[in-house]
Image: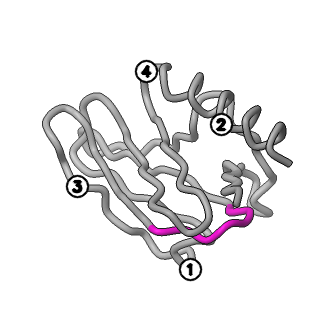
Amino acid sequence: MVRGMALALALLAAACAAPGSSLRPGTGGGETTFRVHGPADEVWLVGSMTGWRPVPLARDGDQWVLRLPLEPGRYEYRLEVREHGVTRVEWLPGAERADDGFGGENGILRVER
């Protein structure tokens, strides 16, 4: 279990180093931080952890940030980034993905104990 969690955290740390979106996962009900780097007019997190309702990220300099307390488990999500009237969907770099049932994909976030 500890080895699996260490591997998951190492993979997420590598993803966080890439430009675009990043995540610092919480553990055991701790705070999970979503970040989107770069220009945008608005950014929302939409996923199973929000009841599929858009939750806005707050601008913090040149990035957008949202902190959520998440219990251990598997969550599906997407980050919707609106810039110049166009909305694009982002996931964490290298994120596992799942079919959303509507012709698109959701990212998968796993929060470990």
Residue in view at x 67 percent, y 48 percent:
107
Relative placement, left or right, of 49 versus 31 is: right
Residue in view at x 28 percent, y 45 percent:
64
| Nearer-N-terminus badge (1/2) | 2
In the rendered image of this protein, does residue 91 appear above or below residue 27?
above
Residue 49 image offset from top left, x and y in percent: 57, 71
Relative placement, left or right, of 68 versus 100 is: left
10 Å crowding of disc 3: few (<14), some (14-19), many (20+): some
> Magenta span covers which residues?
69-75
Number of the front mark, 2 or 4: 2
Residue 19's mark? 4
- For numbered disc 1, what is the local secondary structure? loop
Callout 3–callout 4 Cβ contact below 8 Å: no
Which residue is farthest bottom? 51
* Residue at mark 3 to residue at mark 2: CA–CA distance: 25 Å
Relative to the observer, which residue lies in front, 95 or 83?
95
| Nearer-N-terminus badge (3/1) | 1
* Residue at mark 1 to residue at mark 4: CA–CA distance: 28 Å
Residue, disc 2: 9
What amino acid type is highlighted by mark number 4? Pro
**Total count of labels:** 4
